[in-house]
Image (tube, grey):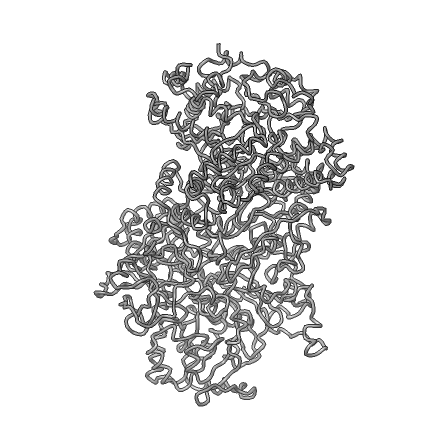
Amino acid sequence: MVTKPLTKNIDMSRPPLDIGAYEATDGYQSLQAIAKGLSPQDVLQLVKDSGLKGRGGAGFPTGMKWSFVPQGESSPQQKYFVVNADEMEPGTFKDRLLMEGDPHLLLEGIIIGAYTIQANISYIFLRGEYVASEQALNAAIAEARQRGYLGKNILGTGFDLDIIVHTSAGRYICGEETALLNALEGKRANPRAKPPFPQVSGLWGKPTIVNNVETVCNLPGILTYGIDWYHGLTKGNDHGTKLFGISGKVKTPGCWELPLGTTIREIIEDYGGGMRDGLSLRGFLPGGGSTDFMLPEHLDIKFDYDEVAKVGSRLATGTMILLDDQTCPVGMIGNLMKFFAHESCGYCTPCRDGLPWVDEIFRELEAGRGTEKDLEILHEHVDYLGPGRTFCALAPGATAPLGSGLKYFAEDFERHVKEQRCPYRR
Amino acid sequence: MSEMSNESTMVNNVIASSATRARRLNAEEIAEIEHEMELYPDKRAVGLEALKIVQKHQGWVSDESLLAIASYLDIPVADLEGVATFFNLVYRRPVGRKVILFCNSVSCWIMGCDSIKEQIEHRLGIDFGETSEDGDFTLVPVPCLGDCDRAPVMMVGDDLHRNLTPEKIDQIFEQYRKQLTADG
Amino acid sequence: MAKIVVDGVEYEVNPDNNLLQECLSQGLDLPYFCWHPCMGSVGACRQCAVKQYRDEEDKDGILVMACMTAASDGAIISIEDSQAKDMRERVIESLMISHPHDCPVCEEGGECHLQDMTLMSGHNYRRYDKKKVTHRNQYLGPFINHEMNRCITCYRCVRFYDDYAGGTDLAAQAAHHHVYFGRHQDGVLENEFSGNLVEVCPTGVFTDKVFSDHYTRKWDLQSAPSVCTGCAVGCNTTPGERYRSLRRIVNRYNSEVNGYFLCDRGRFGFDYVNSDERLQAASKRVGGGLQAFDEAALSGLLTEFADGEMIGIGSPRASNESNFALRCLVGEQNFYSGLADDEQEATQLVLEMARDQAFHSPSIREIESCDAVVVLGEDVTNTAPRVALALRQAVRNRSLDLAADCNIPAWQDAAVRELAQNERSPLALLSSYASRLDDVASDCVIDSPAALAQQGFAIASELSNQAAAAESDHGDTVKRIAQQLKAAKRPLIIAGTSAGSIALIQAAANIARALHESRGAAIDLCLLVPEVNTLGVSLLANPDNRLGSALSRLAAGEVKKAVVLENDLYRRAPRAAVDSALAKAEQLLVIDQFETATTDQADIVLPSTAFSEHEATYVNYEGRAQLSFQVHRNYRGARPGWRWLMEDADGNVEDLINRCAEEATAFAKLDDLLPAAGDFVASMKIPRQSHRYSGRTAMRSNVNVHEPKQPIDDQSVLAFSMEGIPASKDARLMGAAWSPGWNSNQSISKFQDEVNGELKQGDTGTLLLERSGSGQWYSAPAQAATPAGELQVAPAYQIFGSDELSARSPTIRQRMTDAYVSIAPKDAERLGLKQGDAVSLNGNGSLATACIRTRIKPGTAAVYCGDGQINPHEIGDSVALTKSDVAGERSLSGLIVSDLYEEDY
C-alpha cells in the first residue's frame, strides 16, 4: 500500500531512478490505462472525483480548472499544458525535491494532464537557478521519448506530446500563471487580466492549463491506484498527501510528504525535531512568504486548506517558515517586504509604488528612525495593497505577513519606534 | 545575417546614425539559438533564451550583443531590452568570471545570512552589484534558492552551497580562487 | 441599452462598454490614467476604483476598477463611496511618490491630466518623505522631449506608440518602481505618429520640443479651430499663438476625420509660419531686384493690373476662397487649377469616382471599420499619414471578431491582442517598394506601378465576369485577395494619384465596381490626392484647362498677363516649359508665402498669409469641406490670397464663402460650414483667448505702457481677445477644449455625445459631392516597353519633405532626407552603384542618392524628388541612371526604411 505517492522513489543520497527503475515501481502504469481506452473525459472525471486541489498556493480544484478548457470541433486545436516550476516563494523548497528526486513522476503527470485537455505541447517553466532540476528533467524526457511515452502517437493512442523545459531568468512574478505565460512568450512578465482565463485564452492566445509541479505529481497515483486509495491517504477534509516543509530554527529542518490534515504540531515536533534548544516558537508562516502568520496557539489544527483558512491564513505551498523568540519579527517582515517590493513587476500602481514605501519604512524602523506615522502608513497599506485593489495577487500576498504581523507583533513594532532601535539586536 | 535581415518585415528600421552596431553572433551561439527556435511557435519567445545563451558564452549581454540578438530574431531591440532589463539574471553590465547568487530571503535571513554576507564582503571586498577587483566574482542577491531547509545558501556559478557558515565561506572561495587561477 | 445605477441615479448606458467609459459619457467625473478612449482598458493604474454592489440589498459592496468592469444591465455602483474615494486618493498619493512636483517649470502644467486627477481625487498633502526614484532622460530627436522623472507609469505611451501606431523603438524597461519608458539607447523616435505621445502622456514625460523652445502656458495661447494643411486628409487642429509667433499645434477632435491623433508632419510642420524667410511686403520688380510698394500704390494695384485678358493659375495648397477669387478675377475660361497635367488628369478621374454612386469615399473612422483592405500603389504613410494609422486599426477588426466569439469585450485591450496574436483582417499592399505598413499586411506585392495596375485589374476580373481580364504575375495572391474582399463585411480599396498612374486608379475602380455588382451597396473606394485642397481647386477649375496649355498660351504670346496664386510652377511642369512661358509673359503677378523659383520671375510679388493667419475652407480627399478659422493676425504685410485678388479690399471671407456657394458648381453646401450668428448669445463674439489669458496689459509695456485696443476681427465670429462669451459648451468654436476641473485635452469627453462619439454640435465638415449614376469598367492598358538599360519609375514620397510648406519648417528639416533613387541590389550591381553614391538621372542634371533596397523589384527605380531637388516632370515613365562624379553633399541621412541593403553585414 503506497502511502507516499509523491516521494516514494526519492532518495536524495543517490541519483533519481532511471526509467526502468521508475517503471518497476508502478511508473507509467497510468499510460497503460490510457492506452487501454481511458478517454480524456474519463481522466477528467477521475481527477474531479479525486478532489485534488492545486498545490501551488491558490488551492483551486484541479479537475474544475481543467474542465474550463473548451473541447470539441469548434475549439482551437492547439492547446498547451504548462507546468509552473518557477518555485520562488520565499521559504519554499518542495518542487525542487520532486524534480531532482523523481523527474519521471512529473513527466507521467504531465502526460496525463496534457492528454486530458488534449494539449500536444507542454512547457515546464523552470527557475533558471534550478540547474540540477533542468538536467534531471531533460535526461528523463530523453528516456521517456525513447520509450515512446513522448512524441507521436503515444502507446498507439493517437495522442502526440512534446515536453519542453523552459528555464527562466529570475522573477518571482513568473509564478503568477498569466505572468508566466507572458514570460514564456518572451515578453515582460506582467500578469494579464482575468477574465479571460488561460483555459480560454492562454499561451499565444490558445487554451492553456497551468499547474504546479506538485499538483501534477499527484496525477499518476490517482490513475494508477484509484480514487478510493487516494481518498484514503488523508487525515483531514482535503484529499491526498502534501509536501510539508520547515525552515527556520528547528532541530531538523526539511521537507516531508505527509497526509493532508496532519497537525502542525506533529510536523514541527516529530519531523522538524522541535525548536532548537533555548528557543521557543513565536509564530510561523504556514505556506511561504505570502501567507498570514499563525501563532503557537494554532499548532494543534489540522494542516489542510479549510482548517488553516479558519484561522485566517492559507495552506498555500505548505512550507512553513518558523519565527523563534530571538529573531525580530519586524526584521523578518521587513525582509519579506524588501523581497516583494523588488519582485513587483511594476505594472499596477499600488504594488509598484506602495510596496517600496512599505520597504522604506521597514528600513527606517530597522535603522531606529521609525515613527508612529510610519506605523500608521503601514496599517493603511495593508488595506491599500489588499485583494481586489491590485492587478494580481502579488501585493495582496505581501499584505498577508504584513497585516498579520502588525496585529500579532504590534508590541515589537511599537518598541522599534519607542526605543529607536531594533530591540533584538545585541 | 544579411539574408536574415532581407527577410525581415520592418521591425529593425535602419536610420542612418552613429549608433552602436551589432556584433556578429558566433556559430555556437547561433546553433543554440536555432535549437531554441524549434521549440517555440514564435521567434519572439526565444528572446530571453537567446539572451541567456549569449550571456553563457560572453559572460554578459553587451549593447552589441543585444542588437545582434534582436536582429537575428527580428524583434525590436527596444522590446528585447525591455525583457533583458526585466529579469534579474540577465546581466547588462560586465560581471566577474563567477557570479555569486546570494540568497538573502526570509529563511536564509532567519538563519543568519547577514553574517555570511559580511564575510563575503570582507573576503572579496564587494557588496551587492559589485565585482571583485580581480574580475573573478560578482555578488548578486537572489530571492530564495529553494533550499530553505539547508539555509543559508548561495550559488557560485552553477554550484549550490548549503548550510553556510562564515568559516565555510573562506574554504569555498579558497577553492574557487585555486580553480580560477588554474583555469587562467 | 442597459440601465445602471451610479450613486442612486439611474443611467441608460451601452453594455458593450466598460463602466469608466460610460460614466464619462454621462458627464460624471471619475479619475483615470491608463484607459484611453481609443486604446481601451488594461487595468494598470487602478485609479478609477468604484464600489460595486451585488444588488440593492448589498450594503458592503466591493471595490472594482471601473475600466475593467462591464457596464452590464443592472450594475449598481458608487463613485462617491468613501472606500472608493479613499482608494483613489491613495493611488494618486502612490503615483506622486517620486513625481518631481515641478509643475511650475513643466510644459504640461496647466493642461496636465495628472494635475487634474490629483485635484479631483483630493490628494493634497505629501506624506512620503523618503528618497525619490530618479531616471536619466534620453535624446529622442527633434520632436519630443523626455523627462522620465515625471512618469507615473501608466503605460499609455507604449500602448499608443507600439500597439496603436506600430512603433518599435519605444518600450517599457526594467521592473518594479524602476520601470522606464524609452528607446534602447538615445536616438530619434522613428514612428511617424510620435508627436501624439505629447497628448497621450497624462503628464510631462513626453513634451513637445518645438513648443518647449518658445514655451507658453496653454491658457496664454491664442487659439482657434483650424485644419491641417499638410495633406489631403484635413485633420482638425488647434494651433496656438503668443507674442506674434505660432507656438504649437495640438489635435482637435473630429470624430470622422482625425479622432484623437495627428501625424508628425501635421503637428510639427507649422513653424515655417514664423520664418523670417516669409515674403513680407508687396513688391514690384525694378531692374533686377524687388522694391516694396508704398501703401498708396497698393490700393490701385489690382485695378491697374486687371485690365485686359489674364491667365490665372490657382493652387492645390491655396484655399477655396483664394482660388475662387482668382477665378472671379480672370474668368472661368482663364482659370487653371495649377496641378501638373498628369496629376490633373488623375484628379479628374478621382472626382469622377467621387460622383459615382457605386462608391463611397470613407472617412478615417470608416476606414478603421473596414475588415479587408487593398492598397494599390499608394504609400499612404508618406502621402496621407493619418490613413496609415487608420489602417493599423482596420486590421484589428479580425481580433475584435475573435474576441467576441470568446466573450472577451472589445475594450479589454490586452486580452484582445493576446487572443488574436497575429490574426489580422486582410490588408494587401500592392506597392513599388517596402512600406511602413508591411508589418501588418497580409500580402505585400512589390512591383512597378504599371505591373501593380495589372494586378488590380486581375483582382477585379476574379471578382466579376464583367471586369476585363488581365494577366497577373501573382496569380495566387490575386485570387487570395479577391477572396478576402469577397468575404469581408466591409471591403475597402485605396489608391491615389501619387503613383502617377491613371491605370492604378482605374484598376481600383474596377475592383470596387466588381464588389458593388455583387453586393448592390456602395463600396468604400478611397482615392487619395496629395495636397490640402487638391480636390477643392479641381472642382473650381474647368477640367479641360490644363497647365500645359496655359503655359503654351503664354509662350505663344496669346495672353500677356498671368496671375499665379501660391504655386511654384517649377514643381508642376518641366523647367523649359515654365521658363519659356514666363519669359514671354509681359506681366506676371505671383502671390505666395515664400520666395520660389516662380516668384523670382514675377513682376509683382504679393505676400500671402499662412494657414493660421486666415479663415478658409479646404476640401479633403473625401470631398469633405472644412472650415479653418484664423488663429492670429499676420503682423507683417501678408494678406489672404483672395484679398489681394478682390477689388473690394474690405471684403469679408464669409461673404466670399457665401458667394462661392452660390456661384461655383459643387460648392452649394459650402456655406453650411459657417456658424450662424443666431447660435450665439446676443450675437457676441467668441474669444480666441482663454478666460485665464494673462499679461495682456504687460506684454507690450516695453513699447508702451498703455494697453492698446484689441484688434477687431471683422471676418468671423471669433474675437482676438478674452472678451465675449466663451464657447464653453460648443466645441466647434473652441480652440482648446476646457471644462471645469478638466484642463487637459481629456476634457474633450465633456463635449462629445458619448466618449469617442460625435461632438455634441456635430460639425464634422460638409460633404460637397453628390453621387448619381454609375460609371464604366476600365480595361488594363497595354504594357509599354521600357527602353533598354532604363528602369521603370515609381515616384516615392517622404512624410517629411514631400509637402512643400511643412518642408520649410526648421523642425521638419531636421528629419528630411535628400532626393534619392531606390533600386534593387541586382540593378545597383549592374550599374556599378553603391549605397549612398551620387546618381545622375537621365543625364539632365537631376541628382539623387543611390538607395539600394532589398524589397524593390529589379527593373524599378523609386524616385524621391526631395524638397524640390528634382523636378519630377523631367523624369518620364522610365529613367536612365548613371553614377555621378559630382561629390554629393546629399546623403540618406534620416531615411527610415526597413530594407536598406547592407553589403557588409
Residue C601: percent from left, percent from top: 41, 82
Q: Nearer the viewer, residue A193 or A10?
A: A10
Residue C739: percent from left, percent from top: 66, 56
Residue C268: percent from left, percent from top: 52, 64
Is residue C522 in view from this perspective?
A: no
Task: Please state, as top left, top right, bottom left or bottom right, where the N terminus of chain C lies in the image.
Answer: top right
Is residue C209 in view from this perspective?
A: yes
User: Which residue is outermost to the right?
Assistant: A418
Residue C54: percent from left, percent from top: 65, 32
Residue C580 shown left or right of residue A299 in the figure: left
Quadrant assignment, res C632: bottom right
**Up-down relation of residue C208 to residue A30 (above or below):** below
Q: Nearer the viewer, residue C499 or C125?
A: C125
**Up-down relation of residue C514 to residue C418 (above or below):** below
**Up-down relation of residue A329 to residue C188 (above or below):** above
Residue drawn at (51%, 17%), measured in percent from left and top?
A: A50
Residue A74 shown left or right of residue B111 in the figure: left
